[in-house]
Amino acid sequence: MKLRNDFLWGGAISANQTEGSYLVDGKGLSNFDMLPMNDKRLKDVMLDEPNIFNEENQHYPSHTGIDFYHSYKEDIALLAEMGIKCFRFSISWPRIFPNGDDAQPNEMGLAFYDAVLVELEKYQIEPMITISHFDIPMQLVNKYGGWSNRKVVTYYLNYAETLMNRYRHQVKYWVPFNEMNMVMHIPFIGGGLAFSKDENKLQRKYQAAHHQLLANALTIEAGKKINPDFKFGCMLAAGKTYPYTCKPEDVFAALESDKHNLFFSDVQVYGKYPNYIDYYFAKNDIQIDTNLEDFEVLKNHTVDYVSFSYYSSACTAASVEGLEKTKTNGFETVKNPHLPPSNSVWQVDPIGLRITMNQLYDRYHLPLFIVENGLGTPDHQDSTNRVNDDYRISYLADHIKNMIQAVEEDGVELLGYLTWGCIDLVSVSEGKISKRYGFIYVDSDDKGNGSNKRYKKDSYYWYQKVIESNGKVL
Ligand code: BG6
């Protein structure tokens, strides 16, 4: 198999990490707008305890982002000049429904995305819309407790239908939720969940997950009625977990870890809960509220393709005590002694992408779509404003090489490859723009000071050639 001629090379961003203008033109507050730039962003939010919301004199990076709200024309023009074929972006839910439960959508919010789509069409760039990328109107968090409340499913569906009706002719690729599995790790960001002291957190998280899975299936059901040609993808934060050794106990621990991560894509692809989950729920005293009809909905409305993000692999063992730890993108994992040292936050593992692609394709037999991959690291502009980011080029080249091998030597079906943060944006885990991913440099510091001017990095010219040659020149 060869890489398709219509292979969708491109890039991806999210609303809350780029747009800024957080209360402009009728937009309401989102959960993400509540997060200051500090190292507690990923911690659980506890009700009745001092938490990240109560800290003073903080900078809130989503409030300004990279000002994509005003610079989208220039940004899309730059991306078009680089040659991208596909652009994934998310719509800010509270820009459309400022409180989440409003009767009517906010026309000014919709007008912004109308304009973004006009620009994309102008350059014949295929849009991919993420309906919810780590955002939920704060009002739905305050009033209903976020995604663990079933009412949120109805509000979300209303929002999703509003978008799908409006963009029925412009948009084919939809991702209802970004990285749904993240609700287990960052429940406030992934599900708008804040906990009270003695509650069973796992239960709340799985309740929220059930509602998101249901909302996902209902969105597919509604979407296919609006336009049968719509294509829906699940979005999984992927990355194979390796066993630390070949001891059966370690292999089993890695299998377990993968199983729990893949729970979310399993349900979205197979349309049913896997068998093991009942045992897991019983063991952890989890009882979630479901209706019988929910399972019919899940069964009948599954995804068309498997989209996922890949930053690195992970590693685990039956007993992790005493083993050296490191970070994946934001989370702790056992350090893999077989991966070379890297200057990145996480261990770099390009072959891990090929392994992950094989794992997902063998499990699901659906076309894959890599919708996030990239290297987040500080860049430096020299006195001529040049950014020499060879480290990014080599990270991406190694990953693309493995991606092509997965297609051409392993027979994996792949629709496209989108790099994360094709233009610098604010990081989720750190809230800093200095963790840069882009081909385009944004002149802003971590506090949002700077001209916000855009500059092409060396990687910009490199990716241009990659796209032009359909991956032959790396
Ligand atoms: C993915 C998210 O998990 O990782 C993105 O979908 C995020 O929103 C990306 O930005 C990189 O992580 P970080 O923490 O460096 O922004």
Image (cartoon, rainbow, N blue to C red):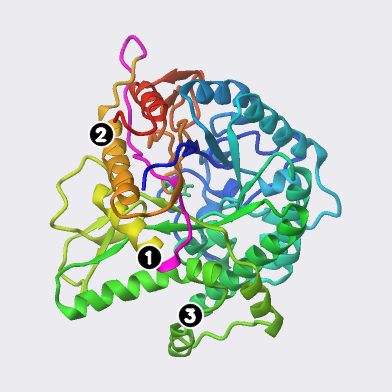
Amino acid type shown at disc 2? Ser
Name the N-terminal-most of marks 2 and 1: 1
Ligand 1 under 8 Å from disc 3 Cβ: no
Does dot 2 land on a helix, a strand or a loop?
A: helix
Tell me the quarter of the picture where residue 247 sits. bottom left
Which residue in the structure is indicated by mark 2?
394
Q: Nearer the viewer, residue 320 or 279?
A: 279
Question: Which residues are drawn in magenta?
Answer: 362-385
Of the numbered discs 3 and 2, the one sitting upstream in the chain is 3
Q: What element does badge 1 sit on? A: helix
Question: Percent x, y for residue 24?
Answer: 72, 34
Q: Is residue 306 magenta?
A: no
Type of amino acid at the residue the image marks with label 1: Asp
Q: Residue at x 85, y 50 (%)?
A: 104
Amino acid found under the numbered disc labelled 3: Pro
Res. 97 visible in picture: no
Answer whether residue 1 is visible to the viewer in this image. Answer: yes
> CB under 8 Å between callouts 2 and 1?
no
Query: Does label 3 or label 1 sit earlier along the sequence?
Result: 3
Q: Which residue is mark 3?
A: 274
Residue annotated with mark 1 = 362
**Magenta stretch: helix, strand or loop mostly:** loop
